[in-house]
Image (cartoon, grey):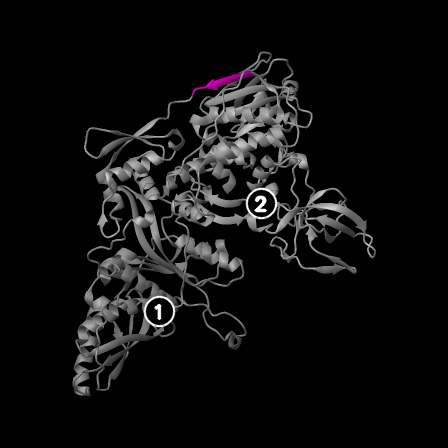
Amino acid sequence: MRISLNWLRELVDISLTPEALADRLTMAGFEVEDIEDRRTWANGVVVGKVIERDPHPNADRLSVCQVDIGTGTPSTIVCGAANVRAGIYVPVATLGTYLPKVDLKIKPAKLRGVASEGMICSLSELGLTKESEGIHIFEEANTSGAGNLCVGSDVRPLLGLDDVILDLTSTANRADALSMVGVAREVAALTGATLRLPEAAAPTIQAGGNLAIKVSDPQACPTYIGTAIAGIKIAPSPLWLQQRLQSAGIRPISNVVDATNYILLEWGQPLHAFDRDRLLSVAGSDKLSIGVRFAQSGESLKTLDGQTKTLQEQTLVITANNQPVALAGVMGGAETEVYEGTQNLMLEAALFDTAAIRRSARSQGLRTEASARYERGVNVAELETACRRALQLIAELAGGAVIAQEKADVRQDETRTIALRLERVNQVLGMVDLGEDLGDLQAKDIEQTLTALGCQLAPTGKPEVWNVTVPPYRCRDLEREIDLIEEIARLYGYDNFCDTLPAKSEPGFLSIEQVITRKLREALRGAGLTELIHYSLGKPGADREIVLANPLFIEYSALRTDLISGLITAFQYNLEQGNGALNGFEVGHVFSNEEDGLTEAEFIAGILGGDPTEGKWVRSGRDQPLTWFEAKGLLNAVFKRMGLAVEYQPDRRDPRLHPGRTASLWVRGNRLGTFGQLHPQLRQERDLPDEVYVFQLDLNVAIDQLDQDEALIPIFQPYSTYPPSDRDLAFYVSTDVMVADLERSMVKASGKLLESVALFDEYRGDRVPTGQRSLAFRLVYRADDRTLTDEDIEPVHQKVREALVEKFRVELRS
């Protein structure tokens, strides 16, 4: 809200400079975003009287004027405005004056050969309007000193430029700060200055009017005051009122409308003036009944902005004999607006429910000064005061007499009393700086601060405990003891409280779960995978899923039961967008509805299938996707880096994966997850390439296995200085036997001499017995203390051969 300091000084005594006041308000929670010092806009501009006006000898559109600016000798000024003439009073920028709004400094100049000693100004050059048709002419009847314009005097008081405007932003819970009276109360509480609030007597009601009020929903409109006024005269507002509205950013319209806007700014109470004769015309009767109800389907209303609104059932409307004439608390109707020929008024002063106005304004896509205040909540206790003040102002500006006033009122008493403990205040706020020492807030400080806010304190019989009665204009934001404590800190000054650090502090650290998860992420990124993030919500349809009771969208109405589905969708989307195959992973939570209740677990999942290599020109630009074994090798590299000894077992439980190319992953007898190739049918449905692989790992199982010192702390293993010796072992074996079982048996039989074992060849075809395959392994032997000889290796190698024959019935080829 834009706050005029001249207006504010009429309500409260202010001795602070604008900058100091802005700092106090900001520290108290009211951010001052800008200080608009209008006094600098016309510093050096004085009132001048045009004595003579002659045409310029060398230019058709210029005039040479002799202007009296109070220096004894008239100044010659060349002026290009068409409305300049002799005998008028004008603002004159004297030599040396700087006009910041047009970035111009007035200097002696020659215009087409004629010297000019100043400039006659328009309102746009003084910053009051964006555009001006000509120079500004003072009308003596509209100035504060009517008929007494003093040549050479400062023009700033005449134009409202002797003011400073503070652009103030308040928090959403401080509805009272959207008014001059509310800000004045705040300034008085902060500075201890005297507060002077405007008052108005109740109007004298003359006979001759008929008016009825009917509120269909008292919860949406607890109070409605309608006042009929006869015999008013529409005219422009006086200059002081126009200047105040303009300083607040409101365009002056007419004396009646400006009066309602003035009360809106002064008290924060929205009002609306109807043309009473037009209301009767819409009502179609000599008797007027003003109603408040929710709109009916199919109704429409043309509002003041010229738009015809289709009303919805949640839109609250004002009616005349049940005909909609205004959007309640938002905007009036065009059919009943006040115009130049208006003679009779119906003034509305009402309280509306905040939620009802919010829904009504949102349904119509409107937000006005009135709706903004109703949405936050206006002061329920001072509605009558604002109404009387408006009637007084209308009578002064437009005349007329009150002929009827009716009220519908179901307001509840909003008096609130809160217990406040001094011990709790000091416990929350801490120590304060008392100059040379530190100490607690005292009871007198609490009483003085809250009394300045308008609260009433009463003892409870317990030491240092009060019953605090909150003023009605603060009932919406002062509800609990902690709210009062916040007000005490705010007014006492946050900067007066001491900063204290804990006696002992500890360095921050990561939990073991965070450490392991970070290492897993690093390993997957190191393998060339990009980390992805998806929503935890998805489409319903899976087994054992948890469906939300109130979803925002049907596409996001169920919690995901795994991560693989989202990765497949992302893979498909990247292909469709021309971005190529996606190699990525995701860490996230999955949810399920089990027999023993709802469960939540954290998993790591990934998808592979793209060609990560460069230099595809050697393959004529064709991709070379990963094979099943290459994808498995990439995953094994991650496991090896993490120190996980993972075993692969055949698995067919996931219908989305190829039944012959899917494995379950196990670590020390615990199921870690699943790895496999997408099922051909699924690839065909999604139009995906053949070589797409996915994995999903249970993060809790991985953490349990890695939560060991030997896994988390790298241990240096010295390199042997002795050379290795390798042996190849080839044999026929049944296709039902897994390579992992063969390798495990070799390691067990060889003892400590075997350094590594690796499969390097597989063959199926001619000369291989049916149901078998030919496998070839390379076994590397090494000792740490000597060079191995054939006598050392052969017995061990023979044990390996015998173990394979005995356990798996292999047919040795070497």
Question: Can residue 464 be seen in this snapshot?
Answer: yes
Relative horizontal placement of residue 537, taking residue 594 as reference (left or right): right
Question: Can residue 804 be seen in this snapshot?
Answer: no
Which quadrant of the structure image shows residue 129? top right
Name the amino acid type tagged 1: Gly
Relative horizontal placement of residue 157, taking residue 529 as reference (left or right): right
Which residue appears at 33% of the width and 28% of the height? 416
- Give the residues drawn in magenta, as a range: 404-410
Q: Is 616 included in the stretch rendered in magenta?
A: no
Name the amino acid type tagged 2: Leu
The residue nearer to you, when weighing 811 against 448, is: 448
Q: Position of residue 587 (x, y in %)?
A: 35, 57
Relative horizontal placement of residue 218, taking residue 310 as reference (left or right): left
User: Callout 1 environment at 10 Å: few (<14), some (14 to 19), or many (20+)?
Assistant: few
Q: Nearer the viewer, mark 2 or mark 1?
A: 2
Q: Is 409 included in the stretch rendered in magenta?
A: yes
Q: Position of residue 559 (x, y in %)?
A: 38, 45
Q: Disc 1 designates what residue?
A: 633
User: Callout 2 environment at 10 Å: few (<14), some (14 to 19), or many (20+)?
Assistant: many
Relative horizontal placement of residue 96, taking residue 633 as reference (left or right): right
Between disc 2 and disc 1, whose residue precedes? 2
Which secondary structure is most common in the magenta stretch? strand
The residue nearer to you, when weighing 273 against 542, is: 273
Are the residues tagged 2 and 1 within 8 Å (C-beta)?
A: no
Which quadrant of the structure image shows residue 774? bottom left
Q: Which mark is residue 414?
A: none
Q: Position of residue 709 (x, y in %)?
A: 19, 66
Q: Disc 2 designates what residue?
A: 161
Up-down relation of residue 576 to residue 486 (above or below) = below
Up-down relation of residue 724 to residue 574 (above or below) = below
Q: SS class of the residue under badge 1?
A: helix
